[in-house]
Image: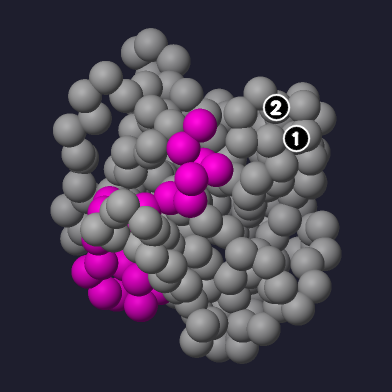
């Protein structure tokens, strides 16, 4: 308990000192996603996890999902819980609503720790990432219309020595950013938000990610 309490305080302090970047979103649709820290607990298994536990990270994880195959856009891709912002909503309100709708997790607004940089996607969204502390979050229930599976990714996995993976993209001045998870990988924009969470919240390093590219399959 002391280790996780210390981690919560550490992340909250780092986010309170972080001047998050709000890019000019133009005509992009506003959206918000949650970087939800919970106990490692149990979740859909991933093969080949290689991150080495270090203190607090032996019990802490991020909640990620795989999008349902029936989704019209980005079906089957890795995602952070979240979605489009309704009129009049803040990013925090959107994330709390979407967590309840997508994974059955009902949280109080007091669990919000802060924001990271908003990310404008090639598919026309301006995504605001909100960091939340969910504690045990013992019972999660996937909404089958939106979520195929729910995963708890240990924070240690974000600290792997082979992360991030940067790949050149023809015609772009910036590389595609990917984060390895087990024997798989997650691409930007989700990977960019995971990487900034790692750098700012876990490592205490001022790192911007708005410029990283997304693979072409994510442009649609």
Q: Is residue 35 magenta?
A: no
Q: For residue 44, which quarter of the picture?
A: bottom right
The way the protein has been coloured in the rendering is one colour
In the drawing, what numbered circle is on residue 68?
A: 1
163 relative to 76, above or below? below
190 relative to 202, above or below? above
Circles 1, 2 touching at the beta carbon (< 8 Å): yes
Residue designated by label 2? 71
Looking at the magenta stretch, what is its main secondary structure? loop
Q: Is residue 218 magenta?
A: yes
What stretch of residues is rendered in magenta? 198-220
Residue 184 placement (x, y as % from top left) = 68, 67
Q: Residues within 10 Å of mark 1 (few under 14, many from 20)?
A: many
Q: For residue 167, which quarter of the picture?
A: bottom left
Question: Residue shown at 61%/88% (left/top)?
Answer: 52
Question: Residue shown at 19%/60% (left/top)?
Answer: 17
Residue 75 placement (x, y as % from top left) = 68, 35
Residue 179 placement (x, y as % from top left) = 52, 67
Which SS class for mark 1? Answer: loop
Q: With 26 as the anchor, is 185 left or right in this view? A: right
Question: Residue shown at 24%/30% (left/top)?
Answer: 25
User: How far apart in space, not on screen, are marks 1 and 2 (Cα)?
Assistant: 6 Å
Which SS class for mark 2? Answer: loop
């Amino acid at each position: 308990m002391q280790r996780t309490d210390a981690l919560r305080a550490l992340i909250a302090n780092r986010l309170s000192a972080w001047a998050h970047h709000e890019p000019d979103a133009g005509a992009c649709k506003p959206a918000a996603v949650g970087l939800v820290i919970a106990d490692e607990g149990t979740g859909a298994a991933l093969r080949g996890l290689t991150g080495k536990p270090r203190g607090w990270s032996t019990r802490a994880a991020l909640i990620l999902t795989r999008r349902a195959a029936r989704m019209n856009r980005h079906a089957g891709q890795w995602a952070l819980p979240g979605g489009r912002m309704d009129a009049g909503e803040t990013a925090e309100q959107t994330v709390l609503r979407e967590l309840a709708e997508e994974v059955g997790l009902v949280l109080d607004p007091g669990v919000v720790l802060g924001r990271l940089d908003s990310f404008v996607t090639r598919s026309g969204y301006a995504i605001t990432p909100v960091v939340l502390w969910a504690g045990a979050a013992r019972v999660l229930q996937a909404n089958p219309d939106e979520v195929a599976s729910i995963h708890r990714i240990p924070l240690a996995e974000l600290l792997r020595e082979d992360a991030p993976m940067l790949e050149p993209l023809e015609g772009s001045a910036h590389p595609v950013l990917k984060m390895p998870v087990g024997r798989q990988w997650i691409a930007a924009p989700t990977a960019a938000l995971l990487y900034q969470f790692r750098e700012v919240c876990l490592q205490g390093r001022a790192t911007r990610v708005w410029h990283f590219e997304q693979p072409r399959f994510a442009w649609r």
